[in-house]
């Protein structure tokens, strides 16, 4: 079986030949370690984090299957339309589509390889090759989309010459916009949602708080603090200051021992008519 050997390759024996323990543990803490060893340790940590994230993202078979099916359907439809369309256009829209089909096929290969990588042990070289190829393909796709846009918008007679081919090109161009603009669209949606969320929280958050009425506040009797009588809390839970003899304090009806400075509790109750300590409503809810 090859699997155990391949797994061993993940340990960077070339950078750390004498160590048979975990290199991550020593590299970050040991200031005497060579910079290249620290670098390899960081890249290992980064690789591990990347792998964990991508494993969770790419590990989902259903997402992979759906995206593969979508790409397959796109390729088949494109081939069918290309086969049926025998007229040429002023700008090479056919070439635009054919290259995009090739990019789709490469994407299937990359997706399959990535899925294989995160479900089976793979060598660092293979991972790097797939990562590099994926980046190159993304850059080429970007450049090719720009080229396709120029060809599409500069062709005046394309809709008359080959309507199916031109429609297909338009669909690919829209896919391109979505592919490159979705982070911006996502951010815009998020920015639009945040004020709504804040407003909702403010409305519903306030809804759960009932301020005390004037009569309720007037019913609260203030008295001078007396340690022999007020045997409970020695500090006001609202301002965190210790009660001093002759401070004006109010005891809430929840529990005679829950006392607060008169000013502190009245300001609190004007916002929310519950005891700050035990959260019991000042007045029973059914009254
Ligand atoms: Zn206070
Ligand atoms: Zn209380």
Image (spheres, rainbow, N blue to C red):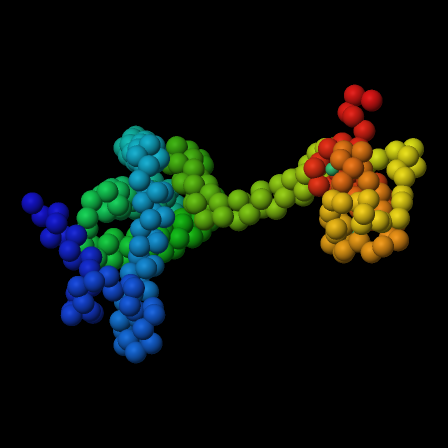
The correct choice, above or below, for 92 with respect to 72 in the image is below
Residue at 80% over, 50% down: 227
Q: Position of residue 175 (x, y in %)?
A: 43, 41
Residue placed most toward the observer, 235 or 142: 235
Q: Quadrant of the C terminus?
A: top right
Q: Quadrant of residue 65?
A: top left
Q: Position of residue 25 (x, y in %)?
A: 29, 64
Q: Quadrant of the N terminus?
A: top left
Residue placed most toward the observer, 262 or 30: 262
Q: Residue furthest left?
A: 1
Left or right relative to 163: residue 256: right
Residue placed most toward the observer, 266 or 253: 253
Residue at 58% over, 42% down: 189
Residue placed most toward the observer, 163 or 51: 51
Left or right relative to 122: residue 267: right
Q: Is residue 84 visible?
A: yes
Q: Position of residue 113 (x, y in %)?
A: 23, 45
Residue at 27% over, 73% down: 36
Residue at 76% over, 35% down: 255
């Amino acid at each position: 079986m090859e699997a155990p050997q391949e797994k061993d390759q993940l340990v960077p024996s070339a950078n750390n030949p004498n160590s048979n323990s975990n290199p991550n543990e020593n590299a970050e803490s040991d200031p005497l370690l060579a910079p290249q060893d620290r670098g390899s340790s960081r890249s290992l940590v980064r690789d591990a984090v990347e792998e964990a994230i991508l494993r969770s993202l790419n590990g989902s078979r259903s997402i992979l299957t759906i995206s593969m099916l979508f790409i397959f359907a796109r390729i088949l439809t494109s081939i069918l339309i290309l086969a049926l369309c025998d007229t040429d256009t002023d700008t090479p829209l056919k070439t635009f589509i054919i290259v995009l089909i090739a990019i789709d096929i490469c994407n299937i290969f990359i997706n399959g390889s990535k899925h294989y990588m995160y479900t089976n042990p793979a060598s660092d070289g293979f991972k790097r090759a797939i990562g590099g190829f994926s980046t190159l393909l993304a850059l080429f796709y970007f450049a090719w989309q720009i080229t396709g846009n120029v060809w599409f918008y500069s062709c005046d007679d394309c809709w008359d010459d080959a309507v199916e081919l031109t429609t297909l090109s338009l669909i690919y161009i829209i896919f391109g916009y979505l592919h490159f603009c979705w982070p911006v669209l996502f951010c815009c949606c998020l920015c639009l949602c945040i004020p709504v969320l804040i407003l909702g929280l403010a409305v519903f958050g306030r809804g759960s708080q009932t301020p005390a009425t004037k009569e309720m506040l007037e019913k609260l009797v203030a008295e001078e603090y007396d340690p022999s009588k007020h045997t409970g809390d020695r500090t006001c839970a609202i301002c965190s200051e210790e009660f001093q003899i002759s401070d004006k304090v109010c005891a809430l009806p929840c529990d005679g021992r829950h006392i607060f400075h008169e000013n502190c509790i009245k300001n609190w109750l004007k916002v929310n008519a519950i005891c700050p300590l035990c959260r019991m409503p000042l007045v029973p809810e059914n009254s």
